Image (cartoon, helix red, strand yellow):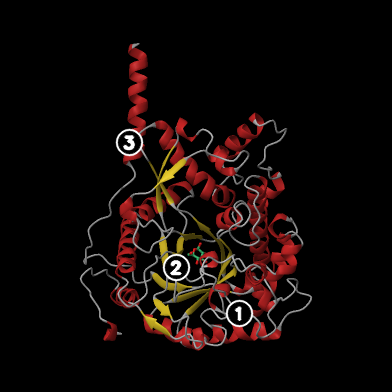
């Protein structure tokens, strides 16, 4: 009894200390601390969300074009991507905005169907190539470094019809496409982001059917998609190093992850938080960044055990071969991170019967909720809690051997108009969390705000306005106007400190 008591106490101590490691507050704003001189600031967009020009210049259809054009109920507010921010015609305006902000880098994506209308390099569209050449040259002429996402969700329709992310050939297709991109733009572009957000591609697109290709396969679809994303990413990386190494660039993947805080000090909730990170981040990060490669053991065990209980002869998480493990391991020169929200998570008996079986959510088996203070009037699914980013950065440092981290997306939503005060508070809080992480020795080198201007927010259309610049979607010329967040961000970039009292007015730009 005495012995048991001691063990219990020890266990309790272990879990309390591990929970206490999470920090629930950031330091106060302090104008004595600043971003290092070589820290890079940027803004981000993606081709499908800003280019428009959907039937201009020989562009082919992506799977998103197909679902939007054939089902008017797909996008919540009934808007389309057809004109978007008109960046296809107004890229010089975009570069002007970036210059006005004073950013160092611009993260944008290449539209696969714009340069390969059929998906494969049998036909390379010269007008598509010319568009990106012009954009890159304009950026460089204005002292802004281009950073390209090769795949940001606009899979050519023809390849989607051949099975898309559920066909193993996707690795060959993406590799061939990446080769065209490196060949044409690699003389001037030195940072490559292979694939944007595997978890979102596979959950929203292949488990829940909310994003194109709208597949609802919450177990096998989700896991097979993730497996193929990892193989395709690795192929894009190897092609660069096998064929284009002399270009001297860097290649990495972008993973998205929200932060999970255990709801209580219980062991179950601590494990729920750990598993949340294993399923949403570790599934993709561990095969690439861990020294041993492969899926994390916790993921293998949870899905394997659940599959066995359900009567499957093999795990629903198909294992990698040893060759595949080696092929994927080490294929990222940096850790690209997109981060928006935090949750509290728990695991207890109340979850019984909450999930579809089989499904990855059933395998993960956690409940989530958020603090009402993390929501604003317009924030939709974004639950902003800046200490979440701080804790996540520390988790990545510890778990993945202290990688160089690029924050490739972070941002929030606000109502229309100049005074986007909630978004201003969000940016300041999160950038302050980055300063906290830098003080702890996290190797964060870049922060890229999402997004330069309001973008077509996928299934939300224009319901979510995330731009530093507001886009007038009623005007066919698509004029843009700076918001307060643009001015505040510009001042942070200029001064390299966060001044919570800087309070610009519309004509201060
Ligand atoms: C995506 C962006 C998107 C943003 C906000 C991220 O998941 O990479 O394309 O616009 O979230 O919705």
Residue 111: x and y in percent read 62, 74
Q: Which residue is mark 2?
A: 464
Q: Is residue 69 left or right of residue 140?
A: right
Q: SS at mark 2?
A: loop
Q: Is the CB of the residue bearing disc 1 within 8 angstroms of ligand 1?
A: no
Q: Is the CB of the residue bearing disc 2 within 8 angstroms of ligand 1?
A: yes
Q: Nearer the viewer, mark 3 or mark 2?
A: 2
Q: Which residue is mark 1?
A: 187
Q: Is residue 481 left or right of residue 199?
A: left
Q: Which residue occupies 31% across, 40% down?
A: 20
Return the residue nearer the eye: 185 or 412: 412
Q: Is 44 placed above or below 367 here? A: below
Checking the image for residue 352, the label placed there is none
* Precedes in sequence: disc 2 or disc 1: 1
Residue 67: x and y in percent read 65, 67
Residue 362: x and y in percent read 56, 39
């Amino acid at each position: 009894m005495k012995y048991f008591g001691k063990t219990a106490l020890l266990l309790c101590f272990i879990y309390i200390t591990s929970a206490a490691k999470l920090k629930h507050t950031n330091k106060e704003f302090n104008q004595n601390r600043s971003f290092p001189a070589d820290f890079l600031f940027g803004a981000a967009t993606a081709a499908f969300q800003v280019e428009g020009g959907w039937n201009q210049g020989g562009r082919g259809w992506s799977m998103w074009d197909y679902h939007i054009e054939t089902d008017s109920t797909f996008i919540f507010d009934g808007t389309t991507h057809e004109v978007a921010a008109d960046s296809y015609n107004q890229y010089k305006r975009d570069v002007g905005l970036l210059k006005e902000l004073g950013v160092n880098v611009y993260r944008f994506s290449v539209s696969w169907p714009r340069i390969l209308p059929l998906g494969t390099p049998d036909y390379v569209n010269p007008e598509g190539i010319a568009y990106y050449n012009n954009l890159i040259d304009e950026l460089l002429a204005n002292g802004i470094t281009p950073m390209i996402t090769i795949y940001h969700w606009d899979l050519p329709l023809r390849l989607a019809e051949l099975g898309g992310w559920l066909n193993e050939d996707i690795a060959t297709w993406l590799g061939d496409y990446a080769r065209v991109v490196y060949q044409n733009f690699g003389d001037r572009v030195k940072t490559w982001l292979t694939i944007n957000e595997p978890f979102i591609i596979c959950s929203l697109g292949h488990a829940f059917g909310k994003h194109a290709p709208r597949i609802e396969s919450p177990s096998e679809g989700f896991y097979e998609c993730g497996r193929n994303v990892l193989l395709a990413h690795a192929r894009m990386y190897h092609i660069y190093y096998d064929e284009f190494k002399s270009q001297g660039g860097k290649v990495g993947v972008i993973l998205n992850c929200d932060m999970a805080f255990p709801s209580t000090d219980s062991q179950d909730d601590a494990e729920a938080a750990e598993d949340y990170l294993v399923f949403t981040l570790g599934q993709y990060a561990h095969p690439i960044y861990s020294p041993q490669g492969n899926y994390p053991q916790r993921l293998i065990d949870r899905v394997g055990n659940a599959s066995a209980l359900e009567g499957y002869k093999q795990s629903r998480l198909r294992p990698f071969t040893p060759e595949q493990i080696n092929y994927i391991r080490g294929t990222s020169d940096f850790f690209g991170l997109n981060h928006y929200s935090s949750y509290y998570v728990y695991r207890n008996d109340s979850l019984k019967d909450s999930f579809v079986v089989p499904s990855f959510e059933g395998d993960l088996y956690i409940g989530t909720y958020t603090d009402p203070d993390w929501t604003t009037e317009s924030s939709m699914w974004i639950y902003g809690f800046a200490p979440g980013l701080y804790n996540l950065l520390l988790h990545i440092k510890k778990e993945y051997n202290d990688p160089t981290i690029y924050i490739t997306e972070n941002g929030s939503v606000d109502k229309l108009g100049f005074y986007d005060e909630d978004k201003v508070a969000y940016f300041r809080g999160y950038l302050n969390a980055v300063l906290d992480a830098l003080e702890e020795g996290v190797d964060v080198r870049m922060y890229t705000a999402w997004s330069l201007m309001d973008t077509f927010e996928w299934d939300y259309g224009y319901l979510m306005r995330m731009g530093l610049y507001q886009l007038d979607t009623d005007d066919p010329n698509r004029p843009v106007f700076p918001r307060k967040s643009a001015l505040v961000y510009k001042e942070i970039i200029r001064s390299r400190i966060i001044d919570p009292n800087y309070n610009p007015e519309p004509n201060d730009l």
